Amino acid sequence: MENPDQLTRLRAEPQLMESAIEEVLRYRSPLHWIMRAPRRDAEVQGHRIPAGALVLPMIGSANRDPRQFPDANRFDIARSPNAHVAFGHGIHFCLGAPLSRLEAKIALGDVLARFESFEPAGTEPWPPRQALHVHGPASLPIRLEASRKAALAY
């Protein structure tokens, strides 16, 4: 809804569905940070991190790093490559990531098929969820208009 040009493109090019989901994950990372503690001393960009020290990797920030993502603050459903870390990385990669991606593909595909349009129901921006590390709306009132094709099917 915030990027109607990209929504129009996705409707016209449904083969971009998986790429669009990856871009949503990068652009609106649901998890913004994860607490970690290295097992042994480490050095990151010239800074020593002692074993056992708490570090706070900022996933949301990493997914907007302009060194990794050209024009990082632009939402682009055809972004390639899109090596985001919304589900973590390496041994800490989320086991539920494939299921989450599949659920998003089915749900978004169904919404696009059933509804001609959807838009925010209010004039205010969506209220953020009251959480330190999980990003998303506390509520998201939307107005839906059923497509004629979907209405005829029911």
Image: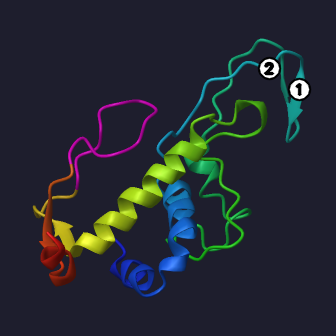
| Residue 146 visible in this rendered orientation of the protein | no
Q: Name the quarter where the C terminus is drawn.
A: bottom left
Q: How many marks?
A: 2
Q: Residue at x 57, y 60 (%)?
A: 22
Per the model, the C-alpha gap separating discs 2 and 1 is 7 Å
Q: Residue at x 23, y 53 (%)?
A: 126
Dot 2 crowding, Cα within 10 Å, few <14, some 14–19, many 20+: few
| Residue 127 visible in this rendered orientation of the protein | yes
Labelled disc at residue 42: 1
Left or right, 46 with reference to 73: right
Name which residue type carries label 1.
Ala
Q: Is residue 132 magenta?
A: yes
In what element is the residue under mark 2? loop
Q: Residue extending furthest bottom?
A: 12
Residue 93, image x and y in percent?
69, 36
> Pointer 2: what residue?
38
Left or right, 79 with reference to 8: right
98 and 49: which is toward the camera: 98
Left or right, 118 with reference to 99: left
Residue 39, image x and y in percent?
84, 15
Q: Specify the segment rendered in magenta.
A: 126-139
Vertical side of 93 occupied by 105: above or below: below
Name which residue type carries label 2.
Pro
Vertical side of 74 occupied by 138: above or below: above
Residue 137, image x and y in percent?
29, 46
In what element is the residue under mark 1? strand
Q: Residue at x 32, y 72 (%)?
A: 112
Q: Circles 2 and 1: CB distance less than 8 Å?
A: yes
